[in-house]
Amino acid sequence: MDRWKQKIADGEVLFGTHITNADMHNAEILGHCGYDYFWIDMEHTQITKHDVCDILLAARAVGPQLATFVRVPILDPAQVKPILEMGPTGIIFPMIFTKEDVELAIQSCCYPPKGIRG
């Protein structure tokens, strides 16, 4: 993320895209093509947790310059925990409508006392 902060401070644009299929080679290609980030869409695709793990491993092979985000299918701590354990840069939560939704999303990502992550 320090690289991101520096690029933003320098007035540069960050380039990213999303992944909607389970082919882990896409992550490697995006990294080698100079993308700064990508996000894996689990909400609107059939991408599984196993697929996410493979894609994130492929992204790590490219190097730390490629940030990775995962959009989880629903706001559910049980869905979020295994994804966080895989080590993406961040989580994208779908269908956030209320203050309580925001609080649950934060709690899902944080350990006690701030959160409920186990």
Image (cartoon, helix red, strand yellow):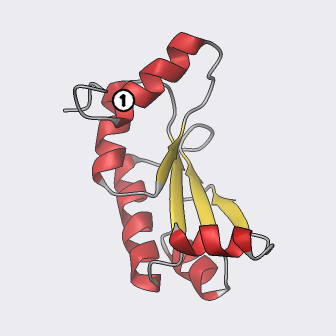
Instruction: Please indicate whether residue 50 sits to the left or right of residue 3 in the image.
Output: left
Compared with residue 54, is residue 105 higher up or lower down, i.e. above or below? above
Residue 27: x and y in percent read 54, 73
Q: Quadrant of the C terminus?
A: top left
Instruction: Please indicate whether residue 19 sits to the left or right of residue 53 in the image.
Output: right
How many labels, in total? 1
Compared with residue 65, is residue 52 higher up or lower down, i.e. above or below? above
Indicate the quadrant where residue 107 lies.
top left
Residue at point 62%, 67% (across, down):
5
Residue 11: x and y in percent read 81, 72
Indicate the quadrant where residue 20 lies.
bottom right
Residue at point 30%, 38% (across, down):
81
Residue highlighted by disc 1: 108
Q: Residue furthest front?
A: 9
Q: Indicate the amino acid at tag 1.
A: Ser
Indicate the quadrant where residue 10 lies.
bottom right
Instruction: Please indicate whether residue 76 sits to the left or right of residue 71 in the image.
Output: left
Closest to the observer, 17 or 89 = 89
Residue at point 64%, 74% (across, down):
6
Compared with residue 82, is residue 114 higher up or lower down, i.e. above or below? above
Badge 1 local density, few (<14 within 10 Å), some, or many (20+)? many
Residue 31: x and y in percent read 58, 81
Closest to the observer, 40 or 35 = 35
The local secondary structure at tag 1 comes to helix
Query: Can residue 22 be seen by looking at this rendering?
Result: no
Query: Can residue 20 be seen by looking at this rendering?
Result: yes
Residue 67: x and y in percent read 53, 66
Residue at point 27%, 25% (across, down):
116
Closest to the observer, 80 or 8 = 8
Q: Residue furthest left?
A: 118
